[in-house]
Amino acid sequence: MPVDIALPSVTARKTPRGVTGDFVFRLLTFLFALLVLLILGGVIVALVQGAFPALRAFGVAFLSTDIWNPVTQKFGALAPIYGTLMTSAIAMLVGVPVAFGVAMFITEICPIWLKRPLATMIELLAAIPSIIYGIWGLFVLAPFVQEYIEPPIIDSLGRLPGIGALFAGPPLGIGVMTAGFILAVMVLPFISSIMRDVFETVPPMLKESAYGLGATRTEVVLKVVLPYTRIGVVGGIMLGLGRALGETMAVTFVIGNAHRVSASILQPGTTISASLANEFTEAVGDLYLSSLVALGLILFAITFIVLAVAKVMLLRLEKRAGG
Amino acid sequence: MNIYAQRRIVNGLVMSLCVAATGFGVLWLVLVLSTLLWNGVAALSPVLFTEMTPPPGSAGGLLNAIFGSVVMTLIGTLIGTPTGILAGTFLAEYSGGSRFGEVVRFINDILLSAPSIIVGLFVYELMVIRMGHFSAWAGAVALAIIVIPVVVRTTEDMLNLVPNALREAASALGSPKWKVIVMVSYRAAIQGMVTGIMLAVARIAGETAPLLFTALNNQFWSTNLNAPMANLPVVIFQFAMSPYADWQVLAWGGALLITIAVLFLNIGARALASWSTFRR
């Protein structure tokens, strides 16, 4: 017997449900993603625009002059560029081996129950704002360095011919070395946490077979883990370098802000970011201000290249781990 | 036999260096925090929270700076968070390996590590010069620009962790995609996203460099967002570099307040993150 089933009346909608909402939401998220690109574009345009008067006035010589004289309105970027590179070099020299040791300890040696708390403690180093490192460096580290570290360095290394020039001069506590040292502590957590991450991408099989052949832990890390993760490790170091180059407040406190290129790392100097922090709000005159913006442009260009290289390297590793 | 002994010695040496390196890292954390506590607690007093920043050579508090920091951090977060979440949503849900998505992701990662003082310069050129004066608005915008990449990154990462089966189930029930994202993906990823926002707030709470050229400083109580506004980091910078003992004590007090806030946010964010992975 046929049953009469009442079907709900279906009226065809002109557009399927939700199409408008989808379009709007998609457009909205797209626009905000575009905003990220616009911020970068804006930064570049603003810096180039602001730096233009100085670059026009001084030309390429801006990069190679170490005069910084607001009175005669003559500016050159050599001293800050030198200071930036020098402090970052010291930071890398000290920070990278320590970061490697920390990463190796946490991934290979440390008992499991200690892993989490240790990793957290090292990462909290990165959470402390840079101004805290600055005030600490100024009031605690600099006097300590002046009293106990610099005199023996000057007496021993400072007397050597050749490299002695690097360690010459009176012990001031404040200077390029102290700044580089603080930077080393600040980039340590960034580098070690990336190293830790990439070390953990090594297939256990590889390590186990090396152990099975009788390799020591050192040999496993140096001959299996490190070659496997080479790109990632370098990427992590570059990322740390990018941080060190642009770090502002901690350096500003302890570098002494002296616009000169001195051979000795115990003497005061300046970095690009420290010059900006110290002088920008007090700069009088368009050319002075523009020269400072030009410094910012140089810093941005350097860090952009370093960070982009780091990112490309880490991406390559990620692709290999994923595929 | 000799070579075995040698290898063992090298191994022992490298292992002890690793332990030493880790100890070195932990030692720094302990040293910084303990001197900060030592000097900061000495500066803590009710006056710190009730009086304005003093002129040189006299006593006072940090009330206006605390207020300014809270206000600008809040506005920066309010501007930066929705922006970051929407951009992160695009990357996770819509970009699907497109060229544009890859470029945005790449640029975002660079902005994430770019020097914050550059952001300050940018906002100076963008707002301070046009408006003709320093202002709290400019400071808040500079902070927002620092928040955005952090939130974009964590939002994308967290949305990528949401199992596709959840989205498919919702789609099969006939939900339009935007509803799937808002009602399903966001809800599944909410803890991770909140963690990211907390980390972003922790980051800007102590940021100094971008505020130097934007919000500047203000010795007096001001709630005018169109005028320079005091804030803890810049006050610490100014007071610590000064030769006045009163000011230096206040700088330590401010430093302690910021560090407590930042560490609290960080540890809270970590606890939230581990709690959510535990629950899953």
Image: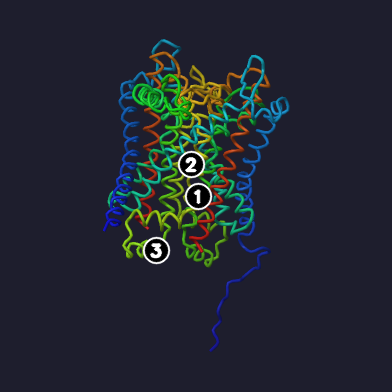
Amino acid type at circle 2 is: Gly
Between A108 and A20, the one nearer to me in the picture: A108
- Mark 2 vs mark 3: give the one in front: 3
Amino acid type at circle 3 is: Leu
Residue placed under numbered mark 1 in the picture: B155
Residue placed under numbered mark 3 in the picture: A206
Q: Residues within 10 Å of mark 3 (few under 14, many from 20)?
A: some
Q: Residues within 10 Å of mark 2 (few under 14, many from 20)?
A: many
Residue placed under numbered mark 2 in the picture: A240
The span from disc 3 to disc 1 (Cα, nearest Å) is 34 Å
Between A273 and B110, the one nearer to me in the picture: A273
Dot 1: element: helix
Q: At x 61% / y 38%, what residue is drawn?
A: A301
Instruction: Give the side of residue A170 with respect to residue B123, left or right.
Output: left
Quarter where residue A303 is shown: top right
Between A110 and A211, the one nearer to me in the picture: A211
